[in-house]
Image (spheres, rainbow, N blue to C red):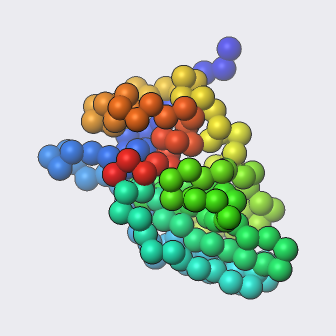
Amino acid sequence: MERPVRLPAGTTGLAPRDDPALPEVGAGPFRSACHAVTRATGMRSVAFPPPDPCTNYRTALLSSYDESVAVLGHHHYPWVAFARADEEVNHSPGFLPPPSWAEHFVWAGFEPLSAEFLSTPTADADLSELLPYEKAQVKVWKPGTIGAIVFNWWG
């Protein structure tokens, strides 16, 4: 049997005010990486919808002539995921496999997460490193997958 996937403290983006600050990935590096992708791949546009204060991630919409993809950038870890741009990515992203151009995010210091990883059942995750407050929120929200923990709207 495979070992469960261990999620680090801060994965949910939630912590009580008296806990130490979580690591932070600023909007600037995420935006820069998205712009670098459009320049390197010839995509024709990138848009940054206004942030949703309840999510623990930022969103960029990248478009070319034949595809539109939402890129989700985690607020606290340099993780990115890809979702269908035509879905409500703020509350229930439909995760996609990383596109061929995802390697540009690696070069910018981000780790593209696979749809397979994000669809792993929560029961197969090791939550032992999550902060106590995060564990309590997982019990409240009952996410079905790792993706619902890593990219959530519980804030």
In the drawing, does residue 7 fall left or right of residue 67? left
Instruction: Name the residue at 35% across, 32% down.
Output: 140
Q: Considering depth in this image, is 6 or 44 the residue closer to the camera?
A: 44
Residue 35 location, quadrant:
bottom right
Residue 100 location, quadrant:
bottom right
* In the image, farthest residue toward the top: 1
Quadrant location, the N terminus = top right
Does 52 sit above or below residue 5? below
Does 79 sit above or below residue 2? below
Instruction: Name the residue at 44% across, 31% down.
Output: 142
* In the image, farthest residue toward the left: 18
Residue 76 location, quadrant:
bottom left
Residue 34 position in % (x across, y down):
61, 74
Residue 57 position in % (x across, y down):
47, 59
Does 30 sit above or below residue 17? below
Residue 17 position in % (x across, y down):
17, 50
* In the image, farthest residue toward the right: 66
User: How many labels were placed on the picture?
Assistant: 0
Instruction: Name the residue at 37% across, 28% down.
Output: 139
Q: Considering depth in this image, is 107 or 35 the residue closer to the camera?
A: 35
Does 144 sit above or below residue 54? above
Residue 61 position in % (x across, y down):
63, 72
Q: Is residue 103 visible?
A: no
In the drawing, does residue 14 fall left or right of residue 65? left
Instruction: Name the residue at 73% across, 76% down.
Output: 63
In the drawing, does residue 40 fall left or right of residue 3? right
In the drawing, does residue 140 fall left or right of residue 127? left
Q: Is residue 138 visible?
A: yes
